[in-house]
Amino acid sequence: MSSSPALSARGSRLALLVVGLCWLAVLFDGLDMFIYGSVLPHLLETKTFGLTPDTAGDLGSYATFGMLIGALTAGTVADRIGRKKLMVGCVVLFSLASGVCALADSVAVFGLGRTLAGVGLGGLLPTAISMVSDYAPRGRAALTIGLLMTAHHAGGILSAYVAKWLIDPVGWRAAFWVCVLPLLFAPVLAKFLPESLSFLVAKGRTEEAAALAARYEVELPAAKSGRKTAADRWDALVGLFRGGEWTQTVLYWLASFGGLLLVYGVATWLPTLMRAEGYALANALTFVVVFNLGGIVGMLVAGRAADRFGAPRISAIWFALTAAGVYLLSVHMSTGVTMVVVFLTGVFLNSAQTMIYATVSIRSTPDNRATAVGWTSGMGRFGAVFGPWLGGQLLAAGNGEWGFTAFALAGVSSMVFIGIAALRGTRQTPRTSGQELVGAH
């Protein structure tokens, strides 16, 4: 069934609104996530709170442990109360938690703030991915998700500049006060972000869905028979293991574990490891900017490639290239060559993990998409917890040069798991077609 040009035009504007608002939310998510790694070299050099490398690794793991909790619960909660409400709540939570970090007078209070921030950060990302998947144009789901994820790396770039501009003249606490500012964005998100049409229809809120569809002149998704009741709220999770789905689910989870170990290990320790290699603090933070610029390029390139060749195949190739790039960072090179390697590593590393999410999202049905993405992200968060801790332990033991090698091995493992999933995927029909994406007309 084709849509009229008017419906397509208004649907495109609706998609632009949803992606734009989610992009800003994920920008703040990236800022809050990367800010710790950006200020960490200063905290270690000044021995703030008596910080040591192993303690710093523990603090990095606190945030990712909070993200684990947020990611594991976000999908189920979003499928029950709605993606919009959860996104607003997550922005409020990680903004206020940054205020706790800014006011902290001990490692314990600072760690509490990072843990609470992690809960909000972990809940926001899979929810935003599910939201834009609902409204993505037909055949452009992976590209739309890649576009969304450029915001995460834009936030990483912003975090490096916040640290460079504020630490010396004002102090590290000012960087965390900047991370409180997204609190002002929460009312904007609550007012202008529409709820997922597929969620409203799945919950039987047809009048609300019809009003929203009429407002933007878009078509409603077809209502599914046998709508779930509250007693069946775990059915979406159980569905990930029915029949032959369990092997794909486990492969995605294992790939996500290695991918997030790599992503958050590098995100936390890149400036510090580069500082240990003899680079000045300003140059070490410049590597963060270059790394995230690569991430933005990678998201756009990977999204288009995944829409054409398949997200799992692109993810496997990207992880192989990531492992090579991360390993090269352990080799002493000229500054110019190192910049190129850092940029290319950023291109492949970040988008490799995102294409795992894209694969899961595209192959999930609208009523369990948030659960599928959330649990894939959540299982990966165990790797995200382990990565910062591992880097801290290696530095504390005087084996910092092994940090990049360990992270490279994680990339190899993810390449293997998502590669097997890609091979299996060639013999399976994806669970979602382009017509099932809300806004695809």
Image (cartoon, grey):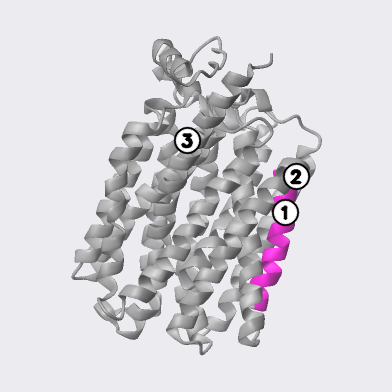
Q: Badge 2: few (under 14), some or many (20 or more) residues near its Cα, within 10 Å? A: many
Left or right placement of residue 274 versus residue 42 in this view: right
From this view, report whether residue 179 is shown above or below residue 220: below
Q: Which mark is residue 18?
A: 3
From this view, report whether residue 439 is shown above or below residue 185: above
Q: Position of residue 308 (x, y in %)?
A: 76, 42
383 in the magenta segment: no
From this view, report whether residue 419 is shown above or below residue 18: below
Foreground of the two, 345 or 14: 14
Left or right placement of residue 322 versus residue 47 in this view: right
Amino acid type, callout 1: Ala
Residue matched to label 1: 316
Q: Residue at x 64, y 88 (%)?
A: 334
Task: Tell me if I can see residue 405 in this picture.
Answer: no
**What's drawn in magenta, residue-wise?**
310-328
- What's the CA distance linking mark 1 and mark 3? 29 Å
Amino acid type, callout 2: Ala
Q: Residue at x 73, y 51 (%)?
A: 314
Q: Which mark is residue 265?
A: none
Query: Of helix, strand and loop, which one carries label 3?
Result: helix
Residue matched to label 2: 422
Q: Are marks 2 and 1 in contact (CB under 8 Å)?
A: yes
Q: Quadrant of the N terminus?
A: top right
Q: Residue at x 58, y 58 (%)?
A: 296
Left or right placement of residue 423 versus residue 34 in this view: right
Q: Main secondary structure of the magenta part?
A: helix
